[in-house]
Amino acid sequence: MNEPLYRDATVPVDARVQDLLSRMTLREKVGQLNQRMYGWDAYRRTPQGSYELTEALHAETERFAGLGALYGLQRADAWSGVDHTNGPGVEEGAALAQLVQRHVVERSRLGIPALFVEEVPHGHMALDGTVLPVNLAVGATWDPQLYEAVAAHAAAELRARGGHVALVSALDIARDPRWGRTEECFGEDPYLAACLTEALVRGMQGERSGDGRFDDDRAPVVLKHFAGQGATVGGRNSAESELGLRELHEIHLPAARAGIRAGAAAVMAAYNEVDGLPCAGNRALLTQLLRERWGFDGLVMADGLAVDRLARITGDKVSAGALALDAGVDLSLWDEGFTHLEEAVERGLVGAEVLDRAVARVLRLKFQLGLFEQLGPAAPPAFPKHGRDVSLAVARASVTLLHNRDGVLPVAGSVSRIAVIGPQSATTAHQLGDYTAPQRPDTGTSVLDGLRQLAPPGTDIRHARGCALTGDDLSGIPEAVAAAAASDLAVLVLGGSSARTPDTEFDANGAALKAVSEMTCGEGVDLAELRLGPAQYRLLDAVVATGTPTAVVLIQGRPHVVPDTGGALLTAWYPGPWGGHAIAEVLLGLTEPAGRLPVSVPRSAAQLPVYYNHKDTEYGGYVDESAEPLHSFGHGLSYTTFEYGTPRVSGGTVTVEVTNTGARYGRTVVQVYLRRLITSTWPRALELCAFEGVGLAPGERRTVVLPLALSMTEARTDSVEIRVAESAREALRAVPVVLDLRS
């Protein structure tokens, strides 16, 4: 008896998809579009240390004679309840994935494997996976080439554990830092986000064959969240986004467009609404724009329970599922609505051909991953080494020096006594960000540990916590003041935390319902203000008042409001477990500060919005406060100085001479901005259109040639000004070069 065509790996993928689709029942097709279970409910650890499958998994695979996809089989965190006592490590994870897959295939009449979908926001969210700095820190590197290599490493870790599909935030643009998920954004600028999204897709997915097949160490990426989620009203999670079409296309869609052009396998429909319709039910967004206009032929996945939310406007979950499927969603996440698609088709709420197209996209991805050929005992790819080095490289590149008065940094050779102070100074738990698996006790380096390891021998390093991240307990401040007063330098480490703990109360989709302990950021933790905990300000004032030179370090998931005080100020965002090592290197001058701000830093929440690329309108400021941000987009200092020559524009490129005029090696980021002059719609004040990081030795000069990206808007533009500078604020003062686009 001949094998079915879909079993033949030499047959083109599309032919295999159509052959398999033709053999499936309606019930089996519906099963392929469902991703109902929480993966951690599919297994349990036995007293002997092995893993067995649960009745819940048996029931789920029985329901649809198989399983389309399984979310979070290896997810570990406070919400899932998975930790090192009950969850799989690296080798166990690969074996568990094989165990589940064998069960799924055995329950499927046609032997269809499941997709294992995992969170990979800054590294695979699994036990013993490499935790990377968060996206905001990646944005601060302004280094797509570095990020591409990092993304490839994360994909290799995922595939080595038996995971298939990576969920990665990339499309959200940080327009309101009160939003708790600001840490998941690359920044406030669409061009910077687009460049990093493209790098993410290239790194994660690698070079694919003509049929779109993935190498064994690369993973299809689901780009989150499509679209406009970073512009929700008031910075509140999942709220509505009041966006006009121009704002949507110019600010919130370029990253998605870049990712799709790079070949992204999938996107995730966001929670928010666009023009009155939630994204998961928005046909204009998911079908007319994404598929018909942009030509996207990949998978669209709904965010968790987003399909069921549509019942608010459809009246019930059956019609909610039909609306989402017809709008363009292919794969649900935890929803009930998609489980009723068989009924929806039979009632005529959605066409059978629409269902078939969605099923075909799910099956195509499974064939492209080679899942039908991986059902035997073959071992997965080896788990990649050097995860610490990969994470540390991003942390080093993201540390940003915001001011440095009187040369406080780098630490001078005459400094023999350093006081390391603050609630972030001696912990790694608050360096990690949201969506992070539990870490083993010996993982990572705090700022205190980093300074003790790297400071010159004989340096007296003393420590005082001073206060907690939250609350107004001032009892530890006198000890901190005494330590600072007795030292040559105070390193004051302040900030916030996205750490989730077992006492956190979670919503059904994993978002925190309320902040507990020292939690100040992450999904579900939106702020009305941008202030640190009250005791941190008292600690800052008290340490600075001692007169000891003070370097303030901020470890945070969003730009907080911090007074422009102290000798030096650095921000490291959430730099990952080894971020303390990277920060210590920068403080001591072993590494140059290389980061640049991916977001503007406001003076207060009352200023918002403060992003640099606002409309070029002559409006006034406030009478009680400056309308300018404290630090502008693109800002970041080095321990040396640079001089830019007069830019020359020709043939779609800009050329500029850059010279290191200081006494140390350093890195500058050449930033090219345009200002539209003659255009069909009202322009923005500035738009980033090119950038490149340049490392130069003392006295070295280099000619930098950058291609200009002039098509971020569909408005007709006849002429522009080109400005080259080291930040958006400096670009406003730079001498422009006028470029006539009509010639």
Image (cartoon, grey):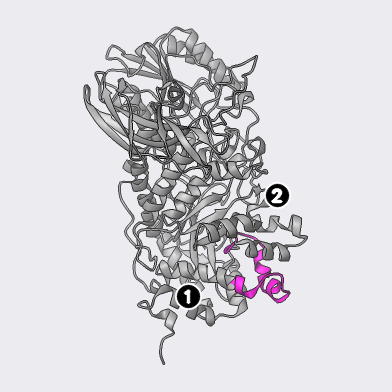
Residue 350 x/y as whole percent: 68, 70
Q: Which residue is mark 2?
A: 276
Query: Is residue 566 visible to us here?
Result: yes
What segment is highlighted magenta in the picture? 329-355
Q: In which quarter of the view is residue 54 placed? A: bottom right
Alpha carbon distance from label 2 to label 1: 36 Å
Specify the quadrant that holds the C terminus.
top left
Would you say residue 316 sits in the magenta stretch? Answer: no
In the picture shown, does residue 408 fall above or below 734? above
Specify the quadrant that holds the N terminus.
bottom left
Q: Nearer the viewer, residue 416 or 203?
A: 203
Identify the residue at image location x=39%, y=46%: 130
Q: Which residue is mark 1?
A: 17
User: On the rendered structure, is 344 left or right of 683?
Assistant: right
Query: Is residue 125 visible to us here?
Result: no
Amino acid type at circle 2 is Gly
